[in-house]
Amino acid sequence: MAPSPKRRPGYSRRAQYTTFFGYFAGVLGALLGGALLIVAITSPSSFSGLRNLGRDVTSPLGGAAARSRSGSYNLFETIGGYFAAGEQNASLRRQLAATRVRLIESQAMADENRRLKALLGLAASDPKPVTFARLTSSTASSSRRFATLSVGSSSGVEVGMPVRSPLGLIGRVLEVGRASSRVLLVTDGESLVPVRRATDSIPGFAQGRADGTLQIRLISLGINPLKRGDAFVTSGTGGLFRPGTPIAIVETVTRDGAIARLLSDPAASEFVAVDPIWTPQPADLPKVAASRGPARP
Amino acid sequence: MTRFARLTRPIAIRFRPRPINHVPSPVLAQSIPWLSIMFASLLPNMPVIASAPVLPPFGLLMMLAWRQVRPGVLPVWAGLPLGFFDDLFSGQPFGSAILLWSLAMIGLDAIEARFPWRSYWLDWLVSAGLICGCQLLGLAFANAAGGSATIAVVIPQLVTAILLFPLSGRLVSALDRLRLMPIVELD
């Protein structure tokens, strides 16, 4: 049935006031939303307390989802392997992916070793991760790329700590609640990671494009030396991210850099490690001051 | 006899005597719309750790569907509390959903006054327009707050959201039947 075209619901004063206040509250809500939005855009860290509270409350729900997700992920993978060429195919592919990452890592390590030997005396040992945790949820309907981590300040997590999986860098901690924290994934448009090519240390930045790929911009302009299949690792410039963590492989070469595919798909990584914030050695300090701007800790 | 019973059972259920001294639970009748929309706001975050915005905004879909299927269940100001809840978890800058959902509710009210005789296709078209508007403005707000995504990133999500809208209408009508189930006995 069509509603009455008249907005005024008869002679009852009370009904009239109810209708009026309904509209009044609706418009007020829109105005309030606009005001909050302006505050949130000018200072993005406002309202983080509210978000932390909400996340702490819903985190157990996400934990259950994460457990069932890892189970169903394996199931789908197995079924997919069966239809393609048997279950063996799937396991071989997993091995191949892992080997490829190991290869890149070892290349990066060899390079790192060479440079460290050159510096001599500045031995950087791998720090122990602060904690291991699950990624419980992510903002799958927004164009911003955030994920929720199932640990918070009670496990020693602090703002700015890098998050990585065995396959590569995933993101960094943005907000910390008591039992959960918010991670800015490297695929988000706001995330800028200083990187270098694994083989010959050509420096650049990797910026997220919000669609699962990264835009790699080289610092030195000129002839673009990148090729398809080049691997990039974090360079450690400016601190925060420890050098030598694999991050992406070049997929398409563009005019001033490349579009690279992320090495560690956050959907496939069940557990992630939270690393301590990496601080460069004193010898690197001049370099830090030069590139503090883009790192945005 | 049992064979006939199997055939006639759906009819028997359809026409079984309803308990005339039972009424719907007021708690369920009031809370199910709100709770289902809030749950739908949480839902896209759960199933997958996504590297791209791949899932439609279920919370917005459910709110529009409740408003379309059952006008009057949600007040005009429902965008304020529901948008507030969505903003806590959606990843958008805070206030984005409060503003957009409030505007969508006011807009739906205006459209209903303009076209009182609605149809399936008109409902779908209006909702598709509102979904597109909310998502594209949401993208603009997210970019203003630090993101740098292009429109191409949200196109797949828009298409799924628009195609899923009639289904969410079905879901809402099922929830509506649950809401109005006579389960409380009158004294």
Image (tube, rainbow, N blue to C red):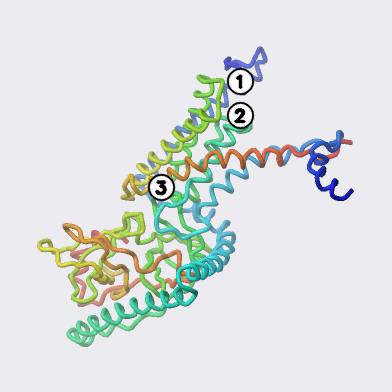
Marked residue chain, label 1: A
Front residue (pair B87, A90): A90
Mark 2 residue element: loop
The total number of labels drawn is 3
Whether callout 3 and callout 1 share a subunit is answered no
Q: Which residue is drawn at 40% across and 47% down?
A: B156
Name the spot of residue B31 as percent of width and height, x first.
67, 41
Q: Residues within 10 Å of mark 1 (few under 14, many from 20)?
A: few
Mark 1 residue element: loop
Q: How far apart are marks 1 and 2 (CA)?
A: 9 Å
Which mark, by number, is residue A3?
1
Q: Distance between the residues labelled 3 and 1?
A: 35 Å
Front residue (pair A196, A249): A249
Front residue (pair A52, B108): B108
Amino acid marked by disc 2: Pro
User: Is tag 3's residue or tag 2's residue first in the polypeptide sequence?
Assistant: 2
Q: Disc 2 designates what residue?
A: B71
Q: In this view, does A12 lie to the left or right of A287?
A: right
Whether callout 1 and callout 2 share a subunit is answered no
Q: Disc 3 designates what residue?
A: B156
Q: Residue at x 49, y 34 (%)?
A: B127
Q: Are marks 1 and 2 in contact (CB under 8 Å)?
A: yes
Q: Is residue B134 left or right of residue A67?
A: left
Mark 3 residue element: helix
On-image quarter of the C terminus of chain B: top right
Q: Residue at x 37, y 77 (%)?
A: A96
Amino acid marked by disc 3: Pro
Q: Note whether A241 is above or below B96 in the view shown.
A: below
Front residue (pair A190, A202): A202
